[in-house]
Image (cartoon, rainbow, N blue to C red):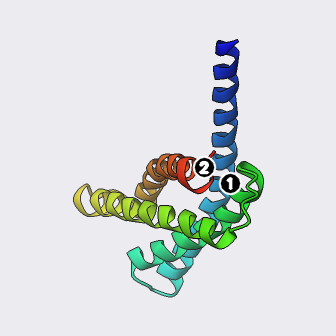
């Protein structure tokens, strides 16, 4: 019985992670699209362009994760959103640090570096939002 419950919890957690990943994948299009537009067309500095894309995607991801991934019924949406954005902002710091290191120090392509940074930050965002924002 105990093993079945643990198996259920693991499957439920993995299912949430897959849903979180799908939402995040949609956010990648928003993030990359806005980053590209601001950096290449409007000539905004690359790390500021990255922040614009990242935070816009984070807002979209909050609403999709609230409704679909975690099915939150928390009536205090403003507080929940604030927690999500704070976690996303920490993720942005991690993302920017990884980007800076890979681009400036290792001379990697900006967009390839961004893919790697997104992968790392996805793990941070899922764990932190699972434990803090949506407190599952």
Local crowd at mark 1 within 10 Å, few (<14), some, or many (≥20)?
many
Say if 125 sits above or below 5 in the image: below
Q: Of tags 1 and 2, which is closer to the observer?
A: 2
Percent x, y for residue 111?
A: 46, 61
Q: Whole-Å distance between the Cαs marked 1 and 2?
A: 18 Å
User: Do residues under tags 1 and 2 come within 8 Å of each other at their CB atoms?
Assistant: no
Tell me the number on the disc at residue 126.
none
Location of residue 91 in the rendering, given as x and y in whole percent from the top left corner = 44, 60
- Location of residue 84 with respect to 21 vertically, above or below: below
Task: Report the front residue among 27 and 70.
Answer: 70
Mark 2 burial class by Cα count in 10 Å: few <14, some 14-19, many 20+: few
First reached walking from the N terminus: tag 1 or tag 2: 1
- Picture residue at 38% right of the left edge, 59% below the top: 94
Q: Tag 2's secondary structure?
A: loop
Q: Is residue 133 visible?
A: yes
Quarter holding residue 100: bottom left
Q: Position of residue 72 (x, y in %)?
A: 73, 55
Residue bearing mark 2: 135
- Furthest residue in direction left, as rendered: 105
Task: Between residue 106 and residue 49, name the one nearer to us.
Answer: 49
Residue 57 in sight? no
54 is higher (above) or lower (below) than 125: below
Q: Position of residue 64 (x, y in %)?
A: 72, 60
Which residue corresponds to mark 1? 23
Seen at 49% across and 61% down, the residue is 87
Residue at the image position 46 percent from the left and 67 percent from the top: 89
Tell me the quarter of the picture where residue 5 sits.
top right
> Based on the displayed image, in which of its 4 quarters is residue 2 positioned?
top right
In the picture provided, is 125 more to the left or to the right than 8? left
């Amino acid at each position: 019985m105990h093993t079945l419950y643990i198996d259920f919890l693991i499957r439920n957690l993995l299912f949430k992670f897959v849903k979180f990943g799908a939402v995040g994948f949609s956010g990648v299009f928003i993030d990359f699209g806005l980053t590209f537009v601001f950096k290449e067309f409007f000539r905004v500095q690359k790390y500021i362009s990255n922040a614009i894309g990242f935070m816009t995607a984070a807002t979209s991801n909050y609403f999709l994760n609230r409704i679909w991934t975690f099915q939150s019924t928390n009536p205090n949406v403003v507080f929940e959103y604030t927690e999500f954005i704070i976690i996303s902002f920490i993720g942005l710091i991690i993302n920017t640090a990884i980007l800076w290191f890979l681009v400036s120090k290792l001379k990697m392509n900006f967009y390839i570096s961004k893919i790697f940074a997104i992968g790392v930050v996805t793990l941070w965002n899922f764990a932190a939002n699972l434990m803090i924002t949506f407190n599952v």
